[in-house]
Image (cartoon, helix red, strand yellow):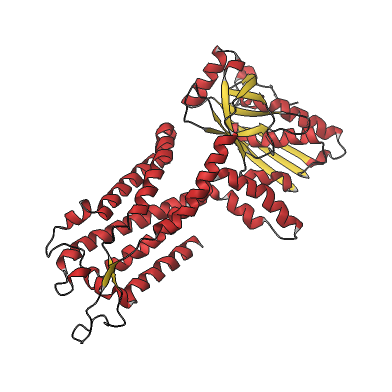
Amino acid sequence: VWLILNGIIFWNTYRLYKGQPQYYYLHQILGSGLCISRGTGAVLNVSCGLILLPTCKRAATTLRRYCCPLLGRCGLSARFIRLFFNQAERFHITCAFTVIIASVIHTGAHLVNAVNCSLYYNHRWIEVNIAESPGQDPLQLVFFTLPGITGVLMMLILTMILVTSASWFRTRHFNTFYYSHHFLFGPFLVLLVFHPTSGMLKEQTNWRDHWPGNDDQDGPPPVFIPMKGYTWLYVTIPIILYLFDWSWRKVSRRQPVSVSRVVVHEPDVIELVVDRWMSHSQPGQYVFLQCPVISGFQWHPFSLSSCCDMTHASWTVHMKTRGDWCKQLKSLLGKTQRDDVELYVDGPFSSPFSDVINSRTVICIAGGIGFTPFLCVIHNLIRNGWNARPDRLHIVFCVQNAESLLWASAAIDQLIEDAWASPRPDKLEIRLHVTRPAPAACRGFSPVS
């Protein structure tokens, strides 16, 4: 669907600049480079506007919470809305790749245009020319004009964002990835808006009085005016929505929270319990945490391993102490009083797993710390009774060694006991897989009763 949409946008723009009479003289100079550059420019406008929408997490979570039940009450299916929200990150990445590919083609077309401006200078109708004189150096148009300068800067920014977003770079240098993403997209959008505003490209306005190409006819000469840039129309509304969502999140996360309990599990898993009411939290959601003592800019996502309800005002996250930020937080919590460590919370936000409580049958397959969101479902069943959704729960938990089961064993133990005491013990099925043989000292050990 995305390819078809962009193909239609490109083709319609391409045909417009190739066949419309007001662009005849400009097409004589630039050739197909004009059509390709304008077609990819239209694709860029749409993609750069839509790429911001998946980052509006607060708005997406609110719409998901209210729109989906409303559609259900109206007898309509909310599957497509949930699918869009579930694929928000993938849609963001798809838009990013579209921007990169279209930018490369757009840049190549304009480099050809810069050469054609000098080679095919129109000596009769000088006003339509982009070059100041015949034979002008194309590099002057690339590096000493507003479109050229902004284009070069945008390509440099895109290159930095692309490199720092690669998985191999992101896992090794997360801080660089985080800062480049958050502090480079703003200048990129500003340059994008100003890129087409120089008026170097011109269109004919009186083509009805002076038919393009019929230069020997009697009548008025062709009149040319600078073409207007319309990029701001595509990005203004997404920017306003993003700023509104960012301001909303900024206000909601300004109150710090304190960690009420810290439990250190083996191997290298810590459990943080926060006694603070979090409205609208449910299994499958996640929060962003910030510790100002460690960094005033970094926000790290963690799945909720238990959420608030009518009888519990606390929520919990489990994190594996892998990475600089988690290691520093563990060290900080071990050195100081827990009440002295302030955390800022942004969220909760929905994830594809948020629909689990609306499903009849759920199959949960996870390994290691990835079991965290499933642990939230277990706590939800323990707290809210055995009649809560889902109707059937299948859990497959894979770990490297038996010790890795310890941090989740208490909740799994409780769930198994409740299942056998309930009238529906067949509602639950748990399979635990240890992929490495246990040491001799641990053989026969079972963390789950």
Please name whichever residue, 18 or 166, is drawn nearer the observer in this view of the structure. 18
Q: Residue at x 65, y 40 (%)?
A: 284
Q: Is residue 227 above or below residue 426?
A: below
Please name whichever residue, 70 or 102, is drawn nearer the observer in this view of the structure. 70
Horizontal and vertical percent position of residue 201: 27, 64
Q: Residue at x 47, y 65 (%)?
A: 4
Horizontal and vertical percent position of residue 59: 59, 46
Q: Residue at x 64, y 44 (%)?
A: 353
Residue 113 in which image quadrant: bottom left
Residue 180 in which image quadrant: top left
Q: Residue at x 63, y 24 (%)?
A: 271
Please name whichever residue, 22 or 288, is drawn nearer the observer in this view of the structure. 22
Point out the image quarter for the C terminus: top right
* Residue 268 is at least partly visible in this image: no
Horizontal and vertical percent position of residue 197: 32, 57
Please name whichever residue, 349 or 364, is drawn nearer the observer in this view of the structure. 349
Horizontal and vertical percent position of residue 234: 45, 57
